[in-house]
Image (cartoon, rainbow, N blue to C red):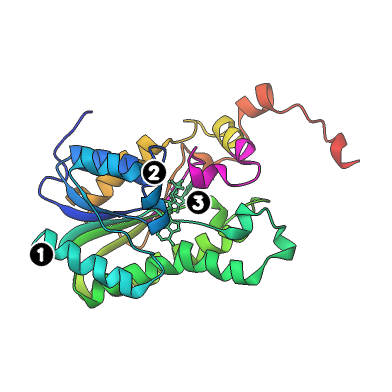
């Protein structure tokens, strides 16, 4: 793996590595190669699945399980992490999302509201909880960097993305609001990466994911960004080379977000003549 020692000496917490396809998994591998050391955290049930132990071994990381919606567990996680590293940390990856409504393929017009709350709590409010806990414990160094993962469904309608659209909209709003307050108080940076459809457990759980994936791939001038490329981009946001970037949602999608229609779609991928509406 090509490395530039971009994160030499930096310490962090990486949330959300479930298996080798996870975006957080790739981020952990690259951050390790770039010289960072970190704690891996995930929900107890994901840790029980077991794959994360392979990642921990490869990256010389300790695993501290935490339900990211539980403030007490988050406090313990930050306290233990600061003990391990003998001080404050430099970066956090928040790579967590889950919707029971999406998983169970409930139609958007018939959402289960308890599950809706769960979606918002796990996928969006958890970022606020992580940031609030870190700020309260003064766990992040000045110019530290927090990165979360979003999707363009935050601002456009994707039919089966369902309540995750609201979760991502809320997530991006928390990036702006908390980014402001944490920036003023401690010069801590908070950004979201709005990532292409990516073949992971969370991604593939969305009904019609293959169409999301291939449509975006055909439309984007560069094609879809994969998890490896996303991890590369995370390295720059954790590094000191992006010090003045905060409160942003940055599209990492091969150009998809600024497209209308592409030659590729017209010539090769789109055969419908419009009769489907008649
Ligand atoms: N895969 C895609 O197409 C895609 C596209 C854009 C953005 N994203 C976002 O990227 C992030 C990472 O997802 P991924 O695609 O790598 O899939 P993934 O399934 O590998 O990762 C999701 C992680 O969230 C964790 N999680 C769920 N509930 C939790 C809880 N209560 N406490 C702690 N952790 C919990 C899971 O255990 C898992 O590790 C998510 O925010 C997702 O919405 C994914």
In the image, what residue occupies the spot 46% across and 41% down?
253
List x then y, in percent, for residue 77.
Answer: 25, 65
Please check the rendered image and state whether residue 203 is part of the magenta-colored stretch, yes or no: yes
Mark 2, other Cα within 10 Å: few <14 / some 14–19 / many ≥20? many
Mark closest to the chain's N terminus, 3 or 2: 2
Q: Residue, x 32% and y 59% (percent of image)?
A: 65
The residue mark sitting in front, 3 or 2, is: 2
Residue bearing mark 1: 87
- In the displayed orientation, state which residue is furthest to the top: 268
Residue annotated with mark 3:
151
The residue segment tinted magenta is 192-212
In the picture, the quarter occupied by the N terminus is top left
Q: Nearer the viewer, residue 5 or 89?
A: 89
Q: Is mark 1 within 8 Å of ligand 1?
A: no
What element does badge 3 sit on? loop
- Look at the numbered disc 3 and say if its residue's Cβ is closer than 8 Å to ligand 1: yes
Label whose residue precedes the other's in the sequence (3 or 1): 1
Q: Secondary structure at mark 1?
A: loop
Q: Picture coordinates of residue 227 (x, y %)?
A: 40, 38
Q: Which mark is residue 23?
A: 2
**Callout 3 crowding tier (Cα within 10 Å): few <14, some 14–19, many ≥20:** many
Are the two marked residues, 3 and 2, in contact with CB atoms closer than 8 angstroms? no
| Quadrant of res 142 | bottom left
C-alpha gap between disc 3 and disc 1 = 33 Å
Task: Give the quadrant of residue 213.
Answer: top right
Asked if one can make out residue 179 in the rendered structure from this viewpoint, the answer is: no
Q: Residue at x 22, y 37 (%)?
A: 58
Of the residues under marks 2 and 1, which one precedes in the sequence?
2
The disc placed on residue 96 is none
Tell me, yes or no, whether the highlighted magenta stretch contains residue 28: no
- In the image, the residue with mark 2 has its CB under 8 Å from the nearest atom of ligand 1: yes
């Amino acid at each position: 793996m090509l490395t530039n020692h971009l994160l030499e000496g930096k310490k962090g917490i990486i949330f959300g590595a479930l298996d080798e396809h996870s975006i957080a998994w790739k981020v952990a591998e690259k951050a390790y190669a770039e010289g960072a050391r970190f704690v891996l955290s995930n929900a107890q049930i994901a840790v029980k699945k077991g794959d994360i132990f392979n990642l921990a071994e490869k990256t010389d990381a300790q695993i501290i399980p935490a339900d990211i919606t539980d403030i007490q567990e988050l406090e313990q996680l930050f306290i233990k992490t600061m003990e391990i590293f003998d001080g404050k940390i430099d970066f956090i990856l928040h790579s967590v999302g889950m919707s029971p409504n999406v998983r169970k393929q409930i139609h958007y017009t018939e959402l289960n509201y308890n599950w809706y709350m769960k979606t918002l709590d796990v996928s969006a409010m958890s970022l606020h909880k992580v940031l609030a806990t870190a700020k309260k414990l003064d766990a992040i160094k000045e110019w530290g960097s927090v990165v979360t993962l979003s999707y363009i469904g935050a601002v456009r309608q994707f039919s089966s993305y369902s309540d995750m659209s609201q979760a991502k909209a809320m997530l991006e709003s928390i990036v702006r609001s908390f980014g402001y307050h944490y920036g003023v108080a401690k010069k801590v940076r908070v950004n979201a990466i709005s990532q292409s459809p990516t073949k992971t457990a969370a991604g593939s759980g969305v009904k019609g994911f293959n169409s999301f994936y291939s449509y975006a791939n055909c439309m984007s001038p560069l094609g879809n960004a994969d998890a490896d490329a996303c991890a590369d981009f995370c390295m720059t946001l954790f590094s000191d080379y992006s010090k003045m970037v905060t409160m942003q949602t940055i599209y990492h999608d091969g150009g998809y977000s600024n497209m209308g229609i592409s030659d590729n779609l017209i010539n090769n991928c789109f055969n419908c003549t419009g009769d489907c509406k008649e």
